[in-house]
Amino acid sequence: MNRHSPLLNALLSPAQMGHADQMTIEAGTPGIELMERAGRAIFDRVLTAYPDAETIHVLCGPGNNGGDGFVVAELLRQAGRTVRLSTLGSPDDLKGDAALAFRQWRGETIALHPADLKEADLLIDAVFGAGLDRPAEGTAAAYIIAMNHSGAPILSVDLPSGVCGATGRVGRDSVHADETVTFFRKKPGHLLNPGKAHCGNITVADIGISDETLEKLGVTSYENAPGLWQAHWPGYCEYVNKYTRGHAMVVSGGPLSTGASRLSAVNALRTGAGLVSLVGSPDALMVHAAHVTSVMLKPASTPQELKELLSDVRVSAAAIGPALGTDAEARKLVDIALSCPPALTLDADVFTLFADDPPALFDWLKHRDRTCVLTPHVGEFKRLFGAIPQDGNRLDAAREAAELSGGVIVLKGSDTIIAEPGGRAAINSNAPPWLATAGSGDVLTGIITGLMAQGMPAFEAACAGVWLHGEAGNRCGPYLIADDLESGLAEVLEEDSHDWSTPDDE
């Protein structure tokens, strides 16, 4: 598979992973062989991450996840480690490949006593894995509680027990792992909160499932990474000039509310748009003039003047919403922007302006020639689409919102989800917690707008923007403020963008 293929970043639901296993078995690889490869991968990770762990307690469930645990237990025993193994339920009840794997175990199987776990150097959680979609109960819950209270590091097989692989939901009792080893591809539950916080360091192991199998699964979920959007990266060519790189406009708030739009404009320019203009009242532009040099200033005191600017065929993208205001005049400006041709990024106050009439916004979006990008945080999302239930599936919620609205949804958070109408979605995983600071979202709006100005399609621009935003935050480090992100963005683009412009065909 091409090293830049989006399928390298595919996320598989537990059902899809089960289908991949089954297709591989039907193609001639015995299930026990897949289990042995999984066990070997876990064994290798134990040796790498915990080379000094001498006493290892392996806790195994009744299914194939437990079977993986039996394999690694025997490998560790053969390697000279002291291995204790406990099973959830009687080994006599095991079936299929898990039963075959247990027969290869040559050590003792002991009843679980929580005090025993405190003597271990490492615990291996092979109780449930990704398939559990309900809270752990009874003895299973007791196993999980004992692991979490042991004080020993925990390596989970496939997914920490108690975390739902499809949604990232966690039960009342769910393992908090230090390491997770999964197979073939990650699951959404590895990246979605709150499950993401339970996984620790994640290793994805190759167990011999083919690329052809992956291509048959109808993947629509991805981990956001350059391979997902680099085929659309604008890059630079020999005959480029500022006009061919697009003109982005950012609509400003009033004179006391200029900072947000300025953050958007500066970062749209930094992302590579050939020209960027801030549009607003003369009073607001006087404030901007004291802060910007490379960004142009375009006066527009009325909705009609804004329409004239945005109707210029040379304007390729625009952003509206950051600190725009929430009065009737602001609503008129948004309506004007929606009626004009440029690609649009909608943020912040736009969601408040349409909170009483979301269908009016959706009608605008569905009748535009170009798909818009909407970038709500959870509170703003609620204004348009309703609250996501506490135990709800954020991935499904973002997909449903994209389908309902007709726009690309960027549902912001530490596990930002990007979804487009039709079902394709990506989960971002590179954003540091210190991006949670005022103005950070305005920077993201600018990055996405700058990319769309250069011709990137809405979904790819949104995915690239979110990833760049996360990387810029990583470069800046803790205690950043939003103004710092431009320098972090410049660093990322300087170091990495040449790799996205030259995908290989291997």
Image: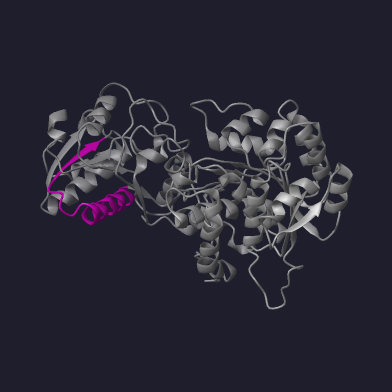
Left or right, 51 with respect to 136, comes to left
Q: Quadrant of residue 125?
A: top left
Q: Is residue 59 magenta?
A: yes
Q: Position of residue 4 (x, y in %)?
A: 53, 63
Closest to the observer, 489 or 188: 489
Q: Position of residue 56 (x, y in %)?
A: 16, 44
Question: Does residue 459 show up?
Answer: no
Left or right, 123 with respect to 502, comes to left
Image height of 142 relative to 181, above or below: above
**Point 73% across, 30% down: residue:** 358
Name the dominant secondary structure of the magenta segment: helix
**Point 55% across, 38% down: residue:** 395
Residue located farthest toward the bottom when viewing the structure as drawn: 238
Left or right, 166 with respect to 172, comes to right
Q: Quadrant of residue 196?
A: top left
Q: Which residues are magenta?
A: 32-60
Left or right, 189 with respect to 70, comes to right
Closest to the observer, 170 or 272: 272
Question: Does residue 56 show up?
Answer: yes
Q: Position of residue 150 (x, y in %)?
A: 19, 34
Count all numbered tags in the image, as a single digit.
0
Q: Position of residue 318 (x, y in %)?
A: 74, 51
Q: Quadrant of residue 312?
A: bottom right
Image height of 156 relative to 289, above or below: above
Q: Is residue 69 magenta?
A: no
Residue located farthest toward the top when viewing the structure as drawn: 138
Figure colour scheme: one colour
